[in-house]
Image (spheres, rainbow, N blue to C red):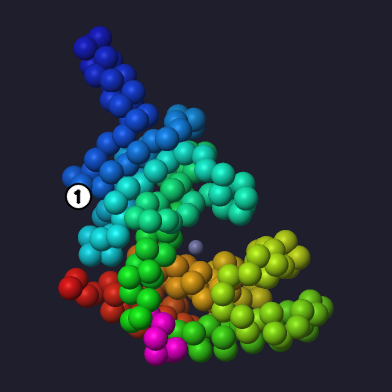
Amino acid sequence: MLIKDLQEIQKRQQQKVSDFYTTRGLHVYFKDKIENPDIDFDKAIAEVETVVPSHLMSEIEMIMVGHFEEFDERGINAFYADGMVCISNEQDNELDIVDDIVHEIAHSVEEVQGYFIYADNKVKNEFLNKRLILHDILWSAGYRVPKKKFTEVEYDQDFDMFLLQTVGYDKLIQYCNGIFISAYAPTSLREYFATGFTDFLLRSDSHNYMKSTCPQLYKKIYKLHADSD
Ligand SMILES: [Zn+2]
């Protein structure tokens, strides 16, 4: 390889540490460097822009990569706030990055499309029915948590920890089989939507399963995806 080419690669890598713009005009900013040399962040972003239609990314102005206090406080590795997707610079593979960014895009879509998604209560009722089924399954499995906890649709950290730590996602995913599409979906109504949105966009082989297990959610996401107005 020519020295000139090497210098060009080095220059690009140095630039990658700070920021770049995608062809769609999305600003990707590196607050902190990605330490894992195997990660090709450009590739992950290109994949996001391939799978998410531009009308569903209208709220996203910037993707900021780095370490944020919220990650430690809330035990998360990505979040959406004010037009910005913040994502951890500690990553194992590009697939996780794509998954996390699409999930956070879902939360941005929810903010502007909240009326369409939730106002008729169809998704909420579907979610609550599933929560009650899950309550009964967990109750029979020995997890005696009051029903009241399962009828709250907003995020609740205790409930999140109950599912994540007390039950554990390995077991929970089995209890959720045929009810929820993932172990994270029962966490809250918003996560029910975000996990559905992510699966719809990233796993086309999941469409039939979602259509039959979560028909109301599927209908909303299908329409959001199809509408480019
Ligand atoms: Zn979420």
Label 1: which residue? 24
Q: Dividing the image into 4 quarters, which one contains the N terminus?
A: top left
Residue in the picture at 47% in, 67% down: 195
Residue that lies at the very extreme toward the front in this rendered image: 82
Residue in the picture at 61% in, 54% down: 74
Residue 50 visible somewhere in the drawing: yes
Q: Is mark 1 within 8 Å of ligand 1?
A: no
Examine the rendered structure and indicate whether residue 100 appears above or below residue 18: below
Q: Crowdedness of circle 1 by 10 Å Cα count: few (<14), some, many (20+)?
A: few
Q: Which stretch appears magenta?
A: 117-122
Left or right: residue 150 versus residue 33 is right
Per the image, label 1 sits on a secondary structure element best described as loop
Front residue (pair 213, 116): 116
Residue that lies at the very extreme toward the top in this rendered image: 3
Front residue (pair 17, 62): 62
* Image location (x, y in percent) of residue 41: 37, 39
Residue in the picture at 37% in, 76% down: 114
